[in-house]
Image (spheres, rainbow, N blue to C red):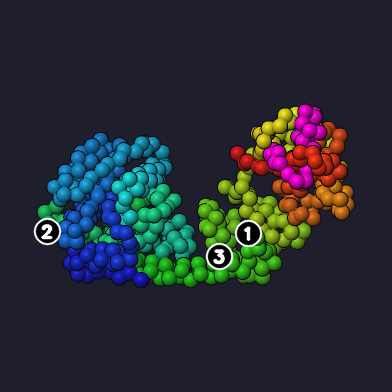
Amino acid sequence: MSRTETGPVPATFARALDALRAQYSPFTMAIACSGGLDSMVLLDLAAAWCRTHGIALHVFHVHHGLSPNADAWLAHVGQAASALGAGFEARRVAVASSGSGVEASARKLRYRALGDMCRAHGATVLLTAHHLDDQAETVLLQLLRGSGPAGLSGMDAANAAPELLGNPALVMARPLLTVGRAKLEAHARGANLSWVEDESNLDVRYARNALRHTVMPALAQAFPGFQERFARSAGHAQSAQRLLVELAQDDLAASLMDGAIDCARLRAMSLDRAYNMLRHWFAVQGLAMPSTAWLTEMVGQLIEARHDAQLLVTHPACHIRRYRDRLHITPKLPDLAGMRDPDDEGVIDKPGESFVWRGEAQLAFPAYGGVLRFDPADTGFDAAWLQGRPLVIDFRKGGERLKLAPNRPTRGLKAHYQAADVPAWERGRLPTISTGRDLLFAAGLGMDCRHFGAAPAELVALRWESQPG
């Protein structure tokens, strides 16, 4: 748990940097510098520490173009970096100048640009100037958004953020997170530093500014030192979140079967524990965290639906499906031409696509979502018999029958799919190949052995490769 520092700012910074250097290797450092008070203190401290340790310093600035003063800010940071002997680079990003998403869009573009510059210069650690007051604002914002322990944990002293920075090898560190802004300003004035003032920081239409200029001063007057207590609460939330993650990891490991969750194990958990594991499952899959209402609805359907029901719940980025009492995450894929449920009555079948094989190694069928390959084989169709013959690719219509091996019975495709444990939602995307009358091949199952050729003929085997668009 972090603690509020009471000593001189340079000593606090040096302790944090020494710890970072001992933890991360290789250690190549860069800082993000906007030109404001906090980041100019960071630049001053980082330059001094790097000189002492003989380490090169890279200074990165992002030009958002939202302020008429942006060019002056860029020049200010560039001149300060040059005076301190640090390398300097700036990137320009284009941010929409209107709408409610300006703040979030600017943040996303800024961090991606910083990640790109770090990659270009080989920086492994990026320092930002976040401080104790920023941490208090973050905790309060998350509380107002109704966040759980993960959100109320605030900012970490150091963490990787590959989604934000686009650079999985980069660590983002905040060595001033235990220092209040008042101390940073005192250091800046004592060191005779100059900084720029971003006029947008006064715009209370932005949530963080509204807190900073209205709520936080009131809290400071009524509850002096509240920032330290917020930071302490964030530390407690971080500890609780680590325990929740450990529990979720254990639960997920015990519940996963071939990449799907065993619903029987899920039902045996308390709702809180089930929610915790599912949120962790989504995080591991790189999916956006679902809302509590969405998660509640999904788990409710899981518990209340019949065990043999094929549940489908739509997530913004995927589908959550239940099949044979297991929970699967499946991608959202576009419908393909001719797809239908063969058990639906009254649906007009679309004709398949006719083609002729002329000896190619493969044929692409974009309308059917994949490629049909023709592989030399010891068992398969006589290539001379197959070549030049009118063929049809189609989706299952219902009633097709297939014999996979001489010692196996001829069965309908539905029975074959069930025996092969092919989930129902995949079957509708698996095409068949026929002569128009006789079924030769069903993707996901195999070829009909009744049409196989015999040695010494040249034999080929059909193989389907799905290529989701």
Residue shown at 80%/29% (left/top)?
390
Residue shown at 27%/45% (left/top)?
61
Amino acid carrying mark 2 in the image:
Gly
Would residue 317 be visible to someone looking at this image?
A: yes
Q: Position of residue 284 (x, y in %)?
A: 53, 58
> Do the residues bearing badges 1 and 3 touch, measured as CB atoms within 8 Å?
no
Q: CA distance from mark 3 to mark 2?
A: 49 Å
Disc with the residue nearer the chain's start (3 vs 2):
2
Disc with the residue nearer the chain's start (1 vs 3):
1
Q: Which label belongs to residue 259?
A: 1
Determine crowd level at label 1: few under 14, some 14-19, many 20+ residues with C-alpha closer than 10 A.
few
Up-down relation of residue 334 to residue 168 (above or below): above
> Do the residues bearing badges 2 and 1 touch, measured as CB atoms within 8 Å?
no
- Judged by depth in the image, the label closer to the viewer, 2 or 1, is 1
Which image quarter holds the N terminus? Answer: bottom left
Q: Quadrant of residue 363?
A: top right
Residue shown at 39%/57% (left/top)?
160
User: Regarding mark 3 in the picture, which secondary structure is present there?
Assistant: helix
Would residue 227 be visible to someone looking at this image?
A: no
Residue bearing the label numbered 2: 190
Disc with the residue nearer the chain's start (2 vs 1):
2
Magenta span: predominant SS is: strand
Residue bearing the label numbered 3: 276
Q: Residue furthest front?
A: 456
Determine crowd level at label 3: few under 14, some 14-19, many 20+ residues with C-alpha closer than 10 A.
some
Q: CA distance from mark 1 to mark 3?
A: 18 Å
User: Regarding mark 2 in the picture, which secondary structure is present there?
Assistant: helix
